[in-house]
Image (cartoon, grey):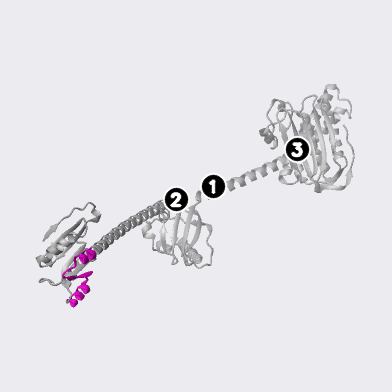
Amino acid sequence: MRTIALPRPDPVKRQTVAIVDDRATNLKILEKLATSLMEGVEVTIFDRPQKALDAAPGNPPDLVITDFNMPELDGAEFIRRFRAIPSCADVPVVVITAYEDRDLRYKALEAGATDFLLSPVDHHEFRVRSRNLLTMRRQQLQLKERATSLEQKMQAEQKRHKDALRESHELLMRVIDAVPVMVAATDRDGRYVFVNDWFAKRIGRPAAQVIGNTPIQVRDDLAARAAMERDRRIVAGIDQAGAFEENLPAIGEIDRRVLLTTKALLRDPSGRPALVVTASLDITDRKAAEMALVHAKDEAELASRSKTEFLANMSHELRTPLNAIIGFSQVMADQLMGPVGSERYVGYSRDICTSAQHLLGIISDILDVSKLEAGKIELDEEETEISQVVRDVMQLVGERARALEIGIDIDLAPDMPQLRADPLKLKQVLLNLVTNAVKFSHAGDRVLLSARFDDRGYHIAVADHGIGMDAREIDTALTRFGQVASTWSRRHPGTGLGLPLAIGLVELHGGRLGVESQKGVGTTVTFTIPRERALIAPSATAVSA
C-alpha cells in the first residue's frame, strides 16, 4: 500500500480516494488519474482487496475504485464485505470491467456498486464520473453532518424542555406540599393517584403507601367510606362537585378537626370523568373562634336585655315615690294646708319639687330609651299640625331661653299639610333638640327652628351658633349616655339621652335624624318624616315668637 498526500487548505474539502487493483500498472494509471481530480484529494492504493477492507473501518474513503477480477476476492464479494462495514455503507464504489464482462457488471451492481467504468479506462470519463461522485459524497457528508447537528440540537432542546418540565413539576409539588391544605386526587376507580404531604401526615402514612389504594384500603373507617362514596357519586354524575364542611374524627394523636373541603371533577380529552381532586382546609380554629364570637354575642345580647329590663323596672319603681315627693312638696310650697312656719321652708319645698321633677325627667328618658330598645313603645297617631307642635315646645322652653338671653326664631313654610303622627312623641323630639340648642348657645345668640315640606316629606331643623362639635364628638353625642367632655358641657346637667331618644322616636315615624356641626361655629340637627305621612288637608297656621 502506498499513499500520496496533496495539500488540503480547507478541512471541509478533504476527500480520500481508495484504488484497489492487483495489477501494479493499473494501480499507477488509476493513481495518477485520481490525483488529478481536484486539489486536496488524498489517494490511497491497495494491491489486495483484503488490505482495503482492513483499512476501511478506521479511515473510510470517500470514493472506491476497484477492479472486478482479483485473485483473492472478486469485485462482487469485495463490495458486499465493504458495504457490511458500518462507516462504509454509503461510500460510492466504481467497478472497472471489460466491455464483454456484462454479467460481471450486473453482479457488481447487485452487490452494491455505485457505477462502473469500461477497461481500458477513458481518462475524461474517469475524471467526470469520479468528480461527480466525490461532489455527491461531499454533499452527502455535509447533509449528514447538518442532520447530526440538528438532531443534537433537537435532543439538547428536548432535554432542556424535559429538565425544565421536571423542575417545574418538582417546584409545583413542593408548593402543593408547602400549602397548609390537604390535597388528593382519585381516579375513576376511586384509587389515589396523588396526595401531598399534609394529606399523608393527616392519615399517618407515607404518600408512597397511599398511592394506588382506595380510601378504604388506606384506612377503613366511616370518613373513608363517606369520601369514597362521595367521589363515586361525583364521577357517576349523581352529585355535583363543590365545597362543604366535614368533621373528621380524631386519629392517633391528632384531635378531631373541622375541614372546609372542595371537590373538583377533571375530565380527559374525550370528556369522560378522569380524576376527582379534593382540597381540604383545616378550619377548626376558625370554627372555634366563630362559636366563641356567637357565644359572646349571645351573652352581650342577654346582658343588654337584662340591663334594659333592670332600667325599666328601676325607673318604674322610682317614679311612684317621686310623684309623691313632687306632689307633697308642691302642697308645702303653696302652703295649701296652712303656713309652714318659715319662709325658708317654702324655699326648701320648691327646691325639693324642682329637683324631684328634674330626677323624674331623667328617669322618664331612661324608661323611654329602655322601651325603645325593647320595642315596647307604640305610636298614638292622630292628625297633627307642625305649627301646633312648635307652639307647644315654645311654651315649654321659651321662658328658659329668655332667662339665658337667647332668642329663638321660627321659620315655618306656609301651607304645610297636616301629618299622621304621634304629637307627644314629636313634641318630645323637638323639645330635646331646642333644649340642647339653648343649653349650648352663648348669651345673645339666636336659635333657628325651621320646617318645610317637599316631595320627600317634612324637614324640621334646629340650628344654633354655640360651641359646636367635631366628628368624634358627634359620634359620642349620638350614643346613649354620651356627653361631650368639655368645660361648657359640664356646666349644664344632662344624661346624654336626648339625641339617642330623639333618633329612636323619629325612626318610629319612619324618618331619619342627622347632625351637622363645626367646632366653635355651631350645630344643626335636622330630622325628616316621610311624605307618606302627609294628609290631604293643609295647615297654614302661622307661628311667631
The quadrant of the rendering that contains the N terminus is bottom left
Q: Residue at x 71, y 45 (%)?
A: 374
Which circle's residue, 3 or 1, is located before the other in the chain? 1
**How much space separates mark 2 and mark 1, taking CA atoms?**
22 Å
Most foreground residue, 101 or 462: 101
Q: Is residue 12 found left or right of 29 in the rendered image? A: right
Disc 2 marks a residue whose amino acid type is Val
| Quadrant position of residue 132 | bottom left
**Residue that label 3 marks:** 365
Q: Position of residue 225 (x, y in %)?
A: 46, 64
Viewer-side label of 3, 1:
1
Viewer-side label of 2, 3:
2
| SS category of the residue bearing label 3 | helix
Q: Is residue 273 magenta?
A: no
**How much space separates mark 2 and mark 3, taking CA atoms?**
58 Å
Part of the protein shown in magenta: 101-130
Q: Is residue 57 found left or right of 381 in the rendered image? A: left
**How much space separates mark 3 and mark 1, taking CA atoms?**
38 Å
Which circle's residue, 2 or 1, is located before the other in the chain? 2
Q: Position of residue 67 (x, y in %)?
A: 15, 69
**Residue that label 1 marks:** 289
The reply to whether discs 2 and 1 touch (Cβ–Cβ < 8 Å) is no
The quadrant of the rendering that contains the C terminus is top right
Q: Position of residue 408 (x, y in %)?
A: 83, 30
The image shows a total of numbered marks equal to 3
Viewer-side label of 2, 1:
2
**Residue that label 2 marks:** 179
**Residue neighbourhood size for the residue with mark 3, other residues' Cα within 10 Å, grouped as few (<14), some (14–19), many (≥20):** some
Most foreground residue, 402 or 494: 402
The reply to whether discs 2 and 3 touch (Cβ–Cβ < 8 Å) is no
Disc 1 marks a residue whose amino acid type is Ala
Specify whether residue 117 is in view. Answer: yes
